[in-house]
Every structure is written in structure tokens, then in C-alpha cells.
Amino acid sequence: MTPKEELHRRISKLQEAMKSEGIGGALIIQRADLFYFSGTGQNCHLFIPAEDKPTLVVKKSMGRAELESNLENIVSFAGWDKLKELIAAKLPEGSKIGLETDVLPANLYFRYQKMLAGFEIVDISKITRNIRAVKSNFELGIMLEAAKISESVFNKARKIIREDMTEVDLAGRLEQHARSLGHQGAVRMRGFNQELYFGHIMSGENAAAISFFDGPTGGSGLNPSYPQGAGAGIIGRNQPILVDFVSVLGGYMVDQTRIFCLGEPPLHLAEAYNTAVSIKNTLGKMGKAGITAGSLYKKAEQMADQAGLANHFMGYVEKVSFIGHGVGLELDELPVIANGIETPLEEGMVFALEPKFIFPGEGTVGIEDTFVVETKRLKQLTGFDENIQVL
């Protein structure tokens, strides 16, 4: 259960931000934000006025919401008119009220627009995402426990990978192992139509297959309805095996990647992998509070170019323009370590660095670890041997 003091701190930050922007209140609906500010993932509306205590309005399940949330004001949903009355009792007509318009479906937006006639609807998502980007010690403690699951998954991979195993068989065995350790299963993403099932576990040329997924790797998947990730292909010798795995505990996730291989990989792939490790470690030393996300990306891009690998860096032909992404309750949180992002890093931000090189027809090599920003450095949360795991 999220402690009362933790919820109060989060809500107070949101209220301060709303007051500074002249927003009278926020109606939080999206599940990750709802859990962050209320401590429950039930079907609810969370109304947070800028100047008063929040009210959690529960549609289903009231009993669980009362058990899971440490908020004081928890009431049952009694219809849209009553929800409007609750808001109108706290905010004068004409007030700005924030909704998560970055993710709210249009039909629901129109319903809220009708219900909130007389109020000015504004987007609250930038504020909530910036608050969530900076993790508390409470959150970091959970993420460190998630990192233990991740390390165990990679140790498991080292023990069970064998020749003639299919990618999906390997994925299933690693997923089962993670679940036995408390992995919740669901990997939440905020981006529209973005989804992920535990991660990308692929080998050889499938690890270089391009897909819709907004990341450097894609994979064929098992069918066109879910065209990413592990396929039915057989894992062969001397092919890089990509294990890119998201571990989630208590809602919070860490992201980690390592490369395994049955026998030695081709020399040029091994050299590219070593460059990826060098990039990750260089950025780990370079990063700290105050440095811009874009400057980290530029350094990585420069190192890839100096190694003669620019054409393969973070994709081939269809590239992505980032090398890192925030993680927490969602896999695509802030900050984004990307080209042109001049946002300075703040102490407590958590993100995954994932320098990867894609070789069409051969595979993907790269590394990924999750870091927290500290005053003078990036502290790595995930741990496992950085070498290619030759089996």
C-alpha cells in the first residue's frame, strides 16, 4: 500500500503546479496516474482541487478501493450529475480543470466536455508526467526489488538457453520464472497503440526485423495481429540472442538487455556490442543532475560514428532518435534521452539507457540498464555481467 505521506507529497506537488498555472483542479482517470495519486488501480475518478483535499469517486470496486487507498475522502460513483456537483462545489464556474488529454479517448473527452460545461478544460498530462518523472525513495526501493527479479531472469537465461529451442519457448520460460518471483505481468505503456509483452526475446535475423514498435528492435512476433517480439524461429549457433526484458513489481518497472550466444558471435557483431557497452558506461559517468538529455544522445551518436557504426545505431534505415527512456509505472515515461531534447536531468529521475546496433539479416547487439539520476552521477539500478554471454 502506498503510504499516506507519499500520496500527500505527490498530491501537494500537483496542487502547487496547478496553482502556478491557474488551474483550479484536476480530474485524474488514466490508470497509471490514478494509481500514482490515489494508491489504487480500481475504476475511479480522482478529483484533486488546487486548494482542498482530493476525493476518490469509485465506480468499481468500492471495497477494494477502500482497502488499497490511503486517501481520506472515498465515495461511490452515483452518476455523472453527482460527479459534476462534487466538482462545482469546489470550483467556481469558468475555472480551468485539467484532464489527461494525451491519452483520453475522444468519446470520453466529449462526455467530460458535456459534463463540465461552464469549466475550461486544459491538458494536465505534462504536469503529471513531469511530477512522476522524479522518483521518491519509496519508489526507488520498489524499483531496486524489481531489479533483483531482472537479474534472476538473466541468470535463468544463462542456464536454460540451448540449441534448437524456439524464441517463443525461451520467452515463455523466462516469463514463467519472472512471474514466480512476483512479476505482475502487465507492462504499461502510455503511447497510443504501443504495447509490450514482457519484452523482446529474439535471435538472429528476427532481432533485426522492423516493426511498428517505437523502439530500436521489433521482431516478427507469432502473427500479424501482434507483429513484434519472439517468433517461432529456432535459436541457432553463433547468432546473437537478444534478451530485452522488463521486470515489474508493485507497479514499478526496470528495463534491461543482455546478449547471449551459443558459441562465439561473428567478430564484427562482438565489436559492435563492445561499442554499445562503452557508450552506456561513458554516458553513465557523464550523466548527472543538470546535464541535458540531448547532450547524452549527441555523445552516444558521436561514439557510434567514431566506431564506424552510425548506419546501424538505434536502427537500420528506419531508426529511432532516442537512446534512453524514462521508466516507472509506465515504460515510456519522462525523461526521453533523445536528439534535440534540452531538458536538464533532475535528481531522482529514472531512465533506461539502451545503445543498440541493428544488422539486417544478422541480428541486434546492444545493452540496456536502468539508472537513477544523482547529483554528480548516474547510479545503475540493474546489475548483471556486461559481457556477451557465450554459452
Image (cartoon, rainbow, N blue to C red):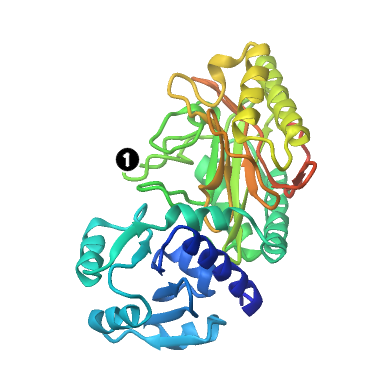
Quadrant in which the C terminus appears: top right
Instruction: Return the x and y of residue 351 as percentages of the image width and height.
Output: 63, 45
Instruction: Return the x and y of residue 179 as percentages of the image width and height.
Output: 59, 62
Determine the image quadrant of residue 385. top right
Compared with residue 297, is residue 42 higher up or lower down, i.e. above or below? below
Q: What residue type is labelled 1?
A: Pro
Task: Determine whether the residue tagged by mark 1 lies in a helix, strand or loop.
Answer: loop
Q: Is residue 187 visible?
A: no
Instruction: Return the x and y of residue 335 as percentages of the image width and height.
Output: 57, 44
Compared with residue 61, is residue 372 higher up or lower down, i.e. above or below? above
Q: How many marks?
A: 1
Determine the image quadrant of residue 114. bottom left
Determine the image quadrant of residue 371. top right
Q: On the picture, is 265 further left or further right than 375?
A: left
Please give the name of the residue rendered at 62% of the width and 58% of the height, measured from the top-left corner: 178
Asked whether 276 or 223 is in front, the reply is: 276
Asked whether 160 or 382 is in front, the reply is: 382
Quadrant in which the N terminus appears: bottom right
Q: On the picture, is 83 further left or further right than 19?
A: left
Residue wearing tag 1: 224
Instruction: Return the x and y of residue 94 as percentages of the image width and height.
Output: 28, 68
- The crowd level at tag 1 (other Cα within 10 Å; few <14, some 14-19, many 20+) is few
Q: Can residue 231 be seen in this view?
A: yes
Please give the name of the residue rendered at 34% of the width and 57% of the height, measured from the top-left corner: 122
Please give the name of the residue rendered at 46% of the width and 68% of the height, measured from the top-left corner: 34
Asked whether 235 or 23 is in front, the reply is: 23
Asked whether 69 or 170 is in front, the reply is: 69
